[in-house]
């Protein structure tokens, strides 16, 4: 076993290790920036998702209220579009398609459209081809998907975003005097 001389064990006689902190800092800066990018992007996407959910909820509630008040599906769709646009996502209005022009009872063009009007039964089934009756509910489903760009785009050759966010809201309004709108989750959706 090798013996260590007192000069070797004395820290003041060891060779200096200057510059090692600089190496560690240089090596960790890219990782710190990547973490910063991820944190800010996650925060932006979360904020956009919350704002889109709020816009969809307002649009669905406005649609059922207008539909019951006027009995006009076009006015209900316009109310939904106006309320969605009033509630912005990251400062931009939410523009949803009316999904009108399919004819039939509720004038739905597509089952996958942004606005779907129909009879929302007490069992939770949104029937897109059935008109609301006195024993059932006016129902509106509003759905939208947006692209949220990354705040950073590209860093060190790595591209971030865009991110897709999706929100859906369903509202119903009981067909009786004093019926109030409420958000709900449908069990299923039936289309012709």
Image (cartoon, grey):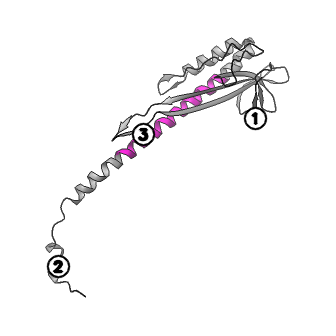
- The label shown at residue 8 is 2
Magenta stretch, main secondary structure, is: helix
Q: Give the side of residue 161 with respect to residue 184, left or right.
A: left
Residue at 59% in and 27% down: 144
Range shown magenta = 33-60
**Residue 107 image position (x, y, % from top left):** 72, 15
User: In the rendered view, would you say 11 is above or below 131?
Assistant: below
Can you say which quadrant of the picture contains the N terminus?
bottom left
**For the residues marked 1 and 3, what is the alpha-carbon distance in whole angstroms?**
36 Å
**For the residues marked 2 and 1, what is the alpha-carbon distance in whole angstroms?**
77 Å
In this view of the protein, which residue sits in the foreground, 172 or 77? Answer: 77
| Whether label 3 touches label 2, CB < 8 Å | no
**Residue 138 image position (x, y, % from top left):** 76, 22
Residue at 75% in and 35% down: 187
Q: Earlier in the sequence, mark 3 or mark 2?
A: 2
Residue highlighted by disc 3: 40
Identify the image quadrant of residue 161. top left
Q: Give the side of residue 38 with respect to residue 94, left or right.
A: left
Residue at 68% in and 19% down: 63
Residue highlighted by disc 1: 187
User: In the rendered view, would you say 8 is above or below 45?
Assistant: below
């Amino acid at each position: 076993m090798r013996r260590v001389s007192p000069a070797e064990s004395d820290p003041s006689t060891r060779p200096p290790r200057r510059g090692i902190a600089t190496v560690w800092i240089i090596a960790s800066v890219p990782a710190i920036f990547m973490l910063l990018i991820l944190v800010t992007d996650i925060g932006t996407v979360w904020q956009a998702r919350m704002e889109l959910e709020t816009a969809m909820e307002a649009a669905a509630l406005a649609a059922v209220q207008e539909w019951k008040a006027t009995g006009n599906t076009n006015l209900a769709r316009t109310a939904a579009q106006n309320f969605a646009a009033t509630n912005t996502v990251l400062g931009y209005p939410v523009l949803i398609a009316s999904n009108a022009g399919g004819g039939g009872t509720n004038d739905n063009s597509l089952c996958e459209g942004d606005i779907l009007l129909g009879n929302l039964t007490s069992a939770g089934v949104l029937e897109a081809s059935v008109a609301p009756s006195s024993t059932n509910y006016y129902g509106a489903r509003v759905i939208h998907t947006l692209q949220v760009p990354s705040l950073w785009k590209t860093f060190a050759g790595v591209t971030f975003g865009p991110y897709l966010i999706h929100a859906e809201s369903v509202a119903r309004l009981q067909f009786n005097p004093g019926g109030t709108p409420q958000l709900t989750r449908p069990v299923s959706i039936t289309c012709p």
